[in-house]
Structures are given as structure tokens and as C-alpha cells.
Image (cartoon, rainbow, N blue to C red):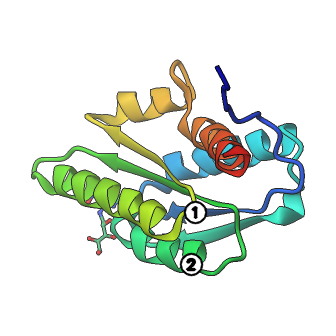
Amino acid sequence: MKEIAGNLDATGMKMAIVVSRFNSFFTEQLVKGAADCFVRHGGKDGDLTLVRVPGANEIPQVAQKLAASGKVDAVVALGAVIQGATPHADLINGTVARALSKIALDTQVPVLNGIVCAQNLEQAIERAGTKQGNKGWDAVMSAIETVAVLKAI
Ligand code: INI
């Protein structure tokens, strides 16, 4: 049996991060985790591009432009959507997740969803560098592996 799997070596990779300013208390922690993961796996800080947008809703359009630009091997979306009194957060989460998946399929450039979807502040804290780790780190790790596996096929 021939098996194909991606390694976790980011040497020579170019990556873009799109991060929302909304809930920046959390999203800045995700950026730190994401950049740390990229560099610790052999990526160069200069090969990482950070793009800021107002909120999670604005991430897909910018991710699409980056993915279609031919300048990056992967795009990582970072945000924090926290449930409030209205169903607004659910709408954002579903719409953005579907859009990011479509961009990846349309462009063949991996687009990783590192958006924290939390019921409350405590859950968001847990995913931004405490009990549940850092979702920015996790998204970059998955991006590195996906780039590598696509290259290997
Ligand atoms: N944007 C977020 O990134 N997180 C949220 O929790 C959030 N909530 O809950 O409203 C949010 N709203 C703003 C939205 O992403 C857009 O920026 C806005 O609707 C303008 O298009």
C-alpha cells in the first residue's frame, strides 16, 4: 500500500493570516500562537503576512483575494465569534465556515478556519492560549500539513 501524508516542515512556505479586530483581546493571542507555530516549524517570519479586517464576516473576501493571488501557499483565518443575546454569532459562524471551505476548493490553496466559536468568554479564553491550547497554533499546524500533503500527491 502506498501511503501519502504531509510532514510538519514549514521551510520555504509562504503563509497569510487574516485576523479580525472584533474581540481583539482574543484574536491577538491567536495571532501570537499562529506566528509561533509557523516559525517553530521552520517557516521564516518574513514569509508570514498578517492582514487585519474588522470582523469575522469580512475574513472570506480577503482570504479569497490572498488565495487567488498566487503569492501564498496557505491562508489561515483567525477570529473570535462569541455568542450574545441574538443569533448573529451562529449566522456568522455558518456563513464564514462555508465560504472559507469554498475558497479552498475553488483556488486549490488551503484555507484553514482558526476562528474560535465560543458560547461565552470562558470558552474563548480556553481556546486562546489556556486550557484548550491556542486555536491559532492549531490552524497553522493544519495548514503546514495540508500544504505538504497536497504537494506530495
Ligand atoms: N464579528 C466577530 O468577529 N465576532 C463576533 O463575535 C461578532 N459578533 O458577535 O457580532 C462579530 N460581528 C461583526 C461582523 O463580523 C462584521 O464585522 C459586521 O457585521 C460588519 O459586516
Where is residue 3 drawn, in percent x and y?
66, 26
CA separation in Å, label 2 and label 1: 8 Å
Whether label 2 touches label 1, CB < 8 Å:
yes
Q: Amino acid at mark 1?
A: Val
Where is residue 125 drawn, in percent x and y?
47, 32
Earlier in the chain: of badge 2 and badge 1, it is 2
Where is residue 21 drawn, in percent x and y?
49, 64
Q: As displayed, is residue 107 above or below residue 10?
A: below
Q: Amino acid at mark 2?
A: Ala
Q: Which picture quadrant has residue 70?
A: bottom right
Q: Determine whether the beta carbon of the residue marked 1 sits less than 8 angstroms from the nearest atom of ligand 1.
A: no
Within 10 Å of the Cα at label 1, are there few (<14), some (14-19), or many (20+) other Cα atoms?
many
Instruction: Give 147 or 135, whichever is nearer the viewer.
Output: 147
Q: As displayed, is residue 59 above or below residue 11?
A: below
Disc 1: which residue: 109
Instruction: Give 19 or 105, whichever is nearer the viewer.
Output: 105
Q: What residue do we see at 58% from left, 62% from top?
A: 109
Q: Which picture quadrant has residue 138?
A: top right
Where is residue 38 drawn, in percent x and y?
77, 46
